Image (spheres, rainbow, N blue to C red):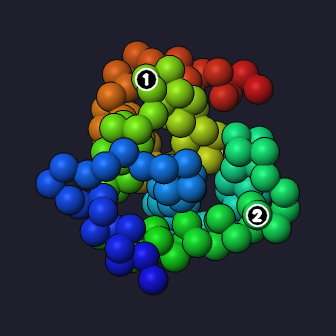
Amino acid sequence: MFEAFLRSLTAPDPDPLTGDDCRLALAALLVRIARTDGDYARVEIDAIDNILKTRYNLGPFEVSKLRADAEQLEQEAPDTVRFTRALKDTVPYENRTEIVEALWEIVLADGTRDHEEDALMRLVAPMLGINDRDSALARQRVERK
């Protein structure tokens, strides 16, 4: 179902993502971080829904559809680089720090910082062009909420 989307992400010179594709890439990245520890917990799903609802001003039906599409896309995508590169090429730096903050919200949603999630965050933040310091500051902002 998402073959064309994945192909567009792997093109040698991909076009910037449109609004809907950007939403889908971010949602898939949120799902990927939530599934990293092998426990896709309800609290993480609720956090993903809340992030998507707030960030894109979506209703419950739209959020559920976007997350369901993202779950399927995340399963079909061979790696994380495709999502991060597409987001980095489309989203301004200051908004990418918000993406890292959203990712930290998912990592911390279940109350534990899992080793696998931490390791993926150490990879994803630089792929988005966010340095370790700014990623740590984003995590601290989430922890203070």
Point out residue 85 in the picture as x, y percentages from the top left corner. Answer: 31, 45
For residue 74, side relative to residue 31 (left or right): left
User: Does 13 appear above or below 60?
Assistant: above
| Disc 1 element | helix
In this view, the residue in front, 15 or 98, is 15
In this view, the residue in front, 96 or 40, is 96
| Disc 2 element | helix
Amino acid type, mark 2: Glu
Residue on which disc 1 sits: 93
What residue is at 35 percent from the left and 73 percent from the top? 4
What residue is at 65 percent from the left and 65 percent from the top? 67
Residue on which disc 2 sits: 62
Point out residue 78 in the picture as x, y percentages from the top left corner. Answer: 29, 69
The first of marks 2 and 1 along the sequence is: 2
In this view, the residue in front, 12 or 35, is 12
In this view, the residue in front, 137 or 61, is 61
Point out residue 6 in the picture as x, y percentages from the top left corner. Answer: 34, 68
Amino acid type, mark 1: Tyr
Spatial CA span between label 2 and label 1: 27 Å
What residue is at 58 percent from the left and 72 percent from the top? 69
Camera sees residue 97: no
User: Does 124 appear above or below 65?
Assistant: above
For residue 116, side relative to residue 31 (left or right): left
Camera sees residue 25: yes
